[in-house]
């Protein structure tokens, strides 16, 4: 899976990778040739006492070393460019995929996992790609080349290699088999830490309000200690393997020196050749160490690649049909026998819902908690698709409309008003970047936000903190409403976004909407009767079913549950 992922995202960088392959090969060949020159220097220069030979070979070795250094730097540069490019493309692919996910898809992986995936997991694969492009190419060339060159120096002494290499391989294979499960656990525990940390930061006020700081600290400490224990157990495996490999290397060096001294004494082997042979043994060991370093990173990279591949292969639950049709303009919205239930729920949230929302009118939706109001909104913007029935725009099934075209027609202001870090202008023009200042201020005026925006020192260039935390809840809601108005979409959906407004501001905002927004479909979800009583029609939901539909006066006469909601909020005299 890791190889398939790297091959897919490495295609645009084939030329860079080819250069790295050639450069690293040249570097390795140079490194293998140096001990041979060193043997010649000792045999023909130092032992013979020929200064000219020492100088000549010494200059050759110096030039070769400088060349190897330059080639190595070039290889690292090109390998870095290729690996950074792979990481960039991988992050972009994950972001693009997740951006197309429905709420069901995101819930399947969890937000914490997706954040970890696009940061930590991609970084692990990016680092592995860079190491693989250098060390993984160099290690086998150096190992094979070292064996060949060592055999050239002395075939009988090379029998030591036949014992050393299998021993090293056994240590490495054992280490990998023990370490892979540990790395899989590490990634899952990092996800858990991110989840806990995200919950604690997001819900810090709730934690403090209920005096749960010690509990949350203990919860985080448990997850942190669990990660540390798992990481330590993996590191102990590598801590054991390193001394084992060093023991094998040093044992082989002693063996080579012992038998090599006998060969030198008998005249069967020159001193320089023994020195070169020991250097080749060291190079073989170095190649094994490089392989170990790559193998150390491989289990974690494999674990990360499996998670990323799963996300990239995920088919979105909500997607475009194979053949799409244009969305009719100025369309009435009709729901025909629509039913919907969340995955894993025992019963449907919406049941056989049939209602028509006329274009250019205000339709309000009211009902008790859990009656399916917000779920209905999610179906209208295709965050989910109904499990039964159809949603149509002037007869055109919403499933047959391209998602982007649908979203270009709808502006949604959700229950939680979220503002992005950046200027106020940036936040207000997200839906329409070419909006003029006049249009922005008109939207702010309708949303009753003009007073506090004009009081800001920088006006529209005022810097908004992440989440809009430098505004009050009511101010955030008004800015979110203004953002929807600036987008100038045909359909405006306000999902219980008037809740933080005081009665006077609520009344002024509704009055401005009614007077100035006459050519759009407005859908208001609210618990307040005062917010929806002037709507063209009001849909009353109870336990996912439509139990009343009509204007305020009609429902007061023929819908008992609606009258009960009204009675719970206002006195009979005030209503009349």
Image (cartoon, rainbow, N blue to C red):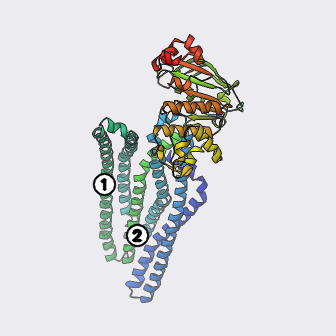
280 left or right of 544 in image:
left
Give the label on residue 560, or none: none
**Residue 22, percent across and down?**
56, 64
Q: Is residue 42 left or right of residue 20?
A: left
Q: Is residue 326 left or right of residue 576?
A: right
Q: Depth check: 155 or 509 in front?
A: 509
Residue tagged by mark 1?
239
| Residue 278 visible in image | yes
Which of the 4 quarters of the picture holds residue 523? Answer: top right
> Which quadrant would residue 213 be assigned to in this image?
top left
Q: Nearer the viewer, residue 458 or 174?
A: 458
- Mark 1 and mark 2: Cα distance apart in space: 34 Å
Badge 1 vs badge 2, beta-carbon distance below 8 Å: no
Pointer 2 residue: 154
Mark 1 vs mark 2, foreground winner is 1
Please provide percent x and percent y for residue 60.
48, 80
Q: Residue at x 47, y 82 (%)?
A: 59
The answer to whether residue 468 is above or below residue 11 is above
Foreground residue, 331 or 507? 507
Q: Is residue 422 above or below residue 415?
A: below
Q: Position of residue 258 (x, y in %)?
A: 29, 69
């Amino acid at each position: 899976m890791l190889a398939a992922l790297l091959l897919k995202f490495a295609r645009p960088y084939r030329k860079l990778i080819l250069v790295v392959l050639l450069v690293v090969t040249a570097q390795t060949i140079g490194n293998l040739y140096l001990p041979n020159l060193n043997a010649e220097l000792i045999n023909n220069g130092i032992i013979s006492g020929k200064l000219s030979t020492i100088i000549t070979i010494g200059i050759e070795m110096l030039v070769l070393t400088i060349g190897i250094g330059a080639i190595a730097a070039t290889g690292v540069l090109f390998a870095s460019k290729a690996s950074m490019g792979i990481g960039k493309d991988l992050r972009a692919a994950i972001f693009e995929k997740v951006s197309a996910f429905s709420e069901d898809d995101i819930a399947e992986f969890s937000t914490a996992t997706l954040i970890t995936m696009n940061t930590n997991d991609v970084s692990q694969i990016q680092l592995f790609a860079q190491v693989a492009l250098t060390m993984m190419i160099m290690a086998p060339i150096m190992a094979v080349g070292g064996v060949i060159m060592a055999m050239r120096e002395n075939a009988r002494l090379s029998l030591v290699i036949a014992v050393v290499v299998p021993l090293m391989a056994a240590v490495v294979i054992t280490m990998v088999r023990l370490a892979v499960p540990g790395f899989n656990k590490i990634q899952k525990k990092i996800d858990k830490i991110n989840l806990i940390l995200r919950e604690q930061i997001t819900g810090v006020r709730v934690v403090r309000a209920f005096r749960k700081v010690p509990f949350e600290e203990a919860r985080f400490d448990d997850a942190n200690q669990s990660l540390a224990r798992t990481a330590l157990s993996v590191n102990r495996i590598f801590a054991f393997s390193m001394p084992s490999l060093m023991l094998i290397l040093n044992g082989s060096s002693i063996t080579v020196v012992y038998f090599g001294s006998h060969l030198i004494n008998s005249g069967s082997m020159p001193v320089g050749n023994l020195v070169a042979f020991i250097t080749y043994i060291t190079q073989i060991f170095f190649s094994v160490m490089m392989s170990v370093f790559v193998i150390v990173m491989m289990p974690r990279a494999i674990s990360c690649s499996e998670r990323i591949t799963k996300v990239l292969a995920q088919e979105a639950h909500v997607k475009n049909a194979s053949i799409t049709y244009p969305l009719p303009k100025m369309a009435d919205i009709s729901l025909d026998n629509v039913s919907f239930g969340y995955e894993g729920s025992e019963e449907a949230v919406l049941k056989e819902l049939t209602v028509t929302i006329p274009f250019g009118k205000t339709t309000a939706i009211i009902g008790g908690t859990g009656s399916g109001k917000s779920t209905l909104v999610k179906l209208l913007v295709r965050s989910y698709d109904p499990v039964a029935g159809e949603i149509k725009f002037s007869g055109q099934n919403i499933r047959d409309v391209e998602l982007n075209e649908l979203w270009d027609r709808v502006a949604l202001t959700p229950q939680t008003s979220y503002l992005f870090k950046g200027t106020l202008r940036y936040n207000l023009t997200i839906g329409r970047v070419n909006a003029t200042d006049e249009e922005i201020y008109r939207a702010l005026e309708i949303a009753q936000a003009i007073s506090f925006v004009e009081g800001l020192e920088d006006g529209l260039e005022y810097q908004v903190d992440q989440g809009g935390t430098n505004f009050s809840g009511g101010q955030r809601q008004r800015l979110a409403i203004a953002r929807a108005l600036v987008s100038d979409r045909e359909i405006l959906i306000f999902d219980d976004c008037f809740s933080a407004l005081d009665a006077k501001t609520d009344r002024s905002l509704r009055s401005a909407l009614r007077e100035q927004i006459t050519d759009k479909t407005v859908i208001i979800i609210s618990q307040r009767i005062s917010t929806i009583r002037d709507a063209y029609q009001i849909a009353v939901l109870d336990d996912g079913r439509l139990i009343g539909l009509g204007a305020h006066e009609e429902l007061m006469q023929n819908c008992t549950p609606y009258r009960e909601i009204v009675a719970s909020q206002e006195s009979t005299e005030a209503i009349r």
